[in-house]
Image (spheres, grey):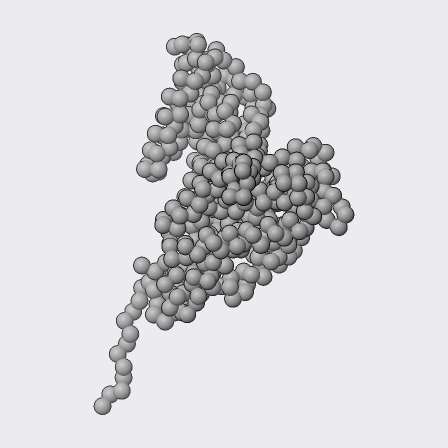
Amino acid sequence: MSTDLPNPPEVAPDGPRIGVDEWVARHGERAGLRGGPLGPLIARGEQLPWWLLLAAAVSASALVPFISSSDYVIRVAVNTVLFALLALGLNVVVGWAGLLDLGFIAFYGFGAYLYALLSSSQFDLHFPALLSVAIVIVSSALLGLLLGLPSRRLLGDYLAIVTLFFAQIYVVLATNADRITLPWNDGPTDFTGGPNGITDIDPISVFGYEFGSTRSYLWLSLGVFTVVVVALQFVNHSRTGRAWRALREDPLAAELMSMPVNRLKLLAFMFGAATAGLTGTIFASVQLGVFPQNFDLPLLITVYAMVILGGAGSIPGVVIGAITINVSLELLRDPSNARALFYSAIVLGLVALVRPWRRLAAVGAGVVVFGILVYQLAEWLRPAWVSGTIEGGRFSDLLDGWVIHPANPTRLGNIGFVLLIIAVLALTELRGVRRMILLVPTLYLAAFVWENRLVTEPSVTRILLLGALLIVLMSWRPQGLLGTARVEIV
């Protein structure tokens, strides 16, 4: 009697292997195939200890007041640190636990308003700053628990709808809670100041030292940022952090492995809410006032963009995302800086994506020649199309005589914007030589629309470029700059 067992069926090299953890088994393959211009840089960065990267980043940021004496630059640095703190808090809920929380900004506003109520002339309480901050952190965590209790059985779109409704309730209350009649009062009580908000908030003081300047608040926010990052690093490598990631990957599998799924969700809500509330206290004290419009939907979109850009689940990634987006949005306020940022981004994108080099040279030469021909043709057909001037910025002389710029550019700019969208959509469908040919007029259209419509409207331009940045990144690296790609077996 033969004891030979039949050979197991062969599995395709790229197929799932029974009894093998695909994520662990393919780690070497992913590391070896990590490509792109950021691949070697990311690989070297992962080898450095996290505390060294944190110390370098905080030290460099702390030197900003010594590098620039501009109060505006220092204020941008403070706002960037605050955005980084918000991104870290949202990363706990979205990046680690995988919960689509659209009410996150409400915790930020709750912390700011609660600190304003405890340390201002609104009710003449003027609590010590450390006591107010402690109350805000605990209260924000409890509010996160209250939001998590009815939401712990919800996932995906359902959770998003409930949390978004919570955020809208907060905005309505902050705007209209200036005339609430309590049972023991005859007249209405003003809690939030209504649309005018709460002003004259006490500055933060710690052990007798009062943070009264923007420079001092930068150092305070960096200190808080350091404490938060260290705490989140320890949590990330704890059993709770590993359980959160298991919950993110597959809630059902995590529950079958006896993980307390509901408790983990509540913990994620509480951690994220506490971080947002703490950030709100710094924001309220540095601004010396809080207003309902400070915590509206655009802020939520911006913070989500920071997490997505940097890579959900990665602490250094979301910090880099916060720095990149906030600094870019500030640069776009000034037309000359915006122009330099726009054309630099186009050049870097072409250098990174167009291969081989001779094709890149052909596209560049084609764009230059195409622009000159179009300008000469427009001047011959209708001189009014080139009667405008491009003012300001270091590129104005180079663009003059190349980009069509009428005196009243609104109509032509709108037409060009529509044509640009059509051209971009067509580029996604074409391949090879046809894509390279269409790329030439598309790049010229982009310059035309930028100079005639977008550079003069920074409020619109910032949102459009933020969306374009995310679209390009998601096509290039769906996991974000420093995020980890997920392996799915289908």
Quadrant placement of the C terminus: bottom left
Q: Nearer the viewer, residue 51 or 187?
A: 187
Report the side of 79 relative to 208 (left or right). left
* Residue 168 relative to residue 74: left or right: left
Residue most extreme to the right: 208
Q: Quadrant of residue 16?
A: bottom left
Expressed as whole percent of the image width and height from the top left, the position of residue 64 reads: 69, 40
Residue in front for this viewpoint, 287 or 407:
287
Q: Residue at x 72, y 46 (%)?
A: 205
Q: Which of the 4 image quadrants contains residue 424? A: top left
Residue located at (28% from left, 76% from top): 7
Instruction: Please say whether residue 230 is visible from this viewpoint.
Output: yes
Relative height, residue 344 to residue 106 (above, below): above
Q: Residue at point 40% right, 48% down? A: 162
Residue lying furthest left = 1
Please provide percent x and percent y for residue 276. Answer: 55, 48
Residue shown at 56% from the left, 31% from the top: 196
Q: Looking at the picture, tell me which residue is in the foreground, 73 or 379.
A: 73
